Structures are given as C-alpha cells and as structure tokens.
Amino acid sequence: MALVDPEGKLRPLACSSGRVHLVKLFEIQSQDGPCLECWRRGEAVQENRLATAQARWPLFVPAALGAGFRSAYALPMRLRDEHLAQTVH
C-alpha cells in the first residue's frame, strides 16, 4: 500500500513482503508502474500478464519480472472524494 504524503508524493506504507517493498520503492522512484498509473487516473489498474506490458511500463516491468511477479493490480483508496492511496498486489 502507498499513501500520499502532505507534499503530494506517494510513499510506501505497508507491504506484504520484502520483495513487494523493493518493487514498490523502485516503482515510486522511477515514477513508472501500476501504482503511479492508478494514482494519476484515479481508477483501478489491472495487468494479468506483465511480460506483455513492457510498452506500458518500460521501467517497472523488468524490475517486477526480475523479482518474480507475473501480474499487477492497483486499486485507488478514497475518503469521500479525496484520493488517498493505492493498494497493489
């Protein structure tokens, strides 16, 4: 899960494993991946086959595949109309 800080930047909040945490940090630092797309669009993002998503996320896909992930999902979290964070699995 990532949360938006007072400056409007995404920060990792909680991850289910160290592997997820490393990929999440890479995604935020590179500004490329499903969490960032979800944040920008304010909509759920789903990619069942990361191996075919290189054009969509050219930096994120190799890092995620290298860490053993094969799919990615990001869901926006809101409080009323305020966009708070994303959960990613």
Image (cartoon, grey):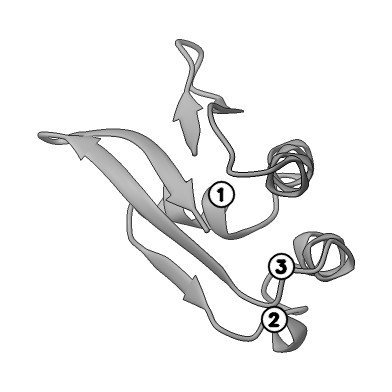
Separation of marks 2 and 1 at Cα, in angstroms? 15 Å
Q: State which tag comes first along the sequence, 3 or 1.
A: 1
Are the residues tagged 2 and 3 within 8 Å (C-beta)? yes
Extreme-front residue of the structure: 17
Judging from the image, what secondary structure is the residue with disc 3 in? loop
Quickly name the residue at label 3: 57
Q: x, y (%) of residue 65?
A: 82, 71
- Residue 9 — which label? none
Q: How many marks?
A: 3
Quickly name the residue at label 1: 36
Separation of marks 3 and 1 at Cα, in angstroms? 10 Å
Quickly name the residue at label 2: 53
Q: State which tag comes first along the sequence, 2 or 1.
A: 1
Are the residues tagged 3 and 1 within 8 Å (C-beta)? no
Q: x, y (%) of residue 5?
A: 48, 16
Judging from the image, what secondary structure is the residue with disc 2 in? loop
Amino acid beneath label 1: Leu
**Who's the residue at 69% across and 81% down the image?**
53
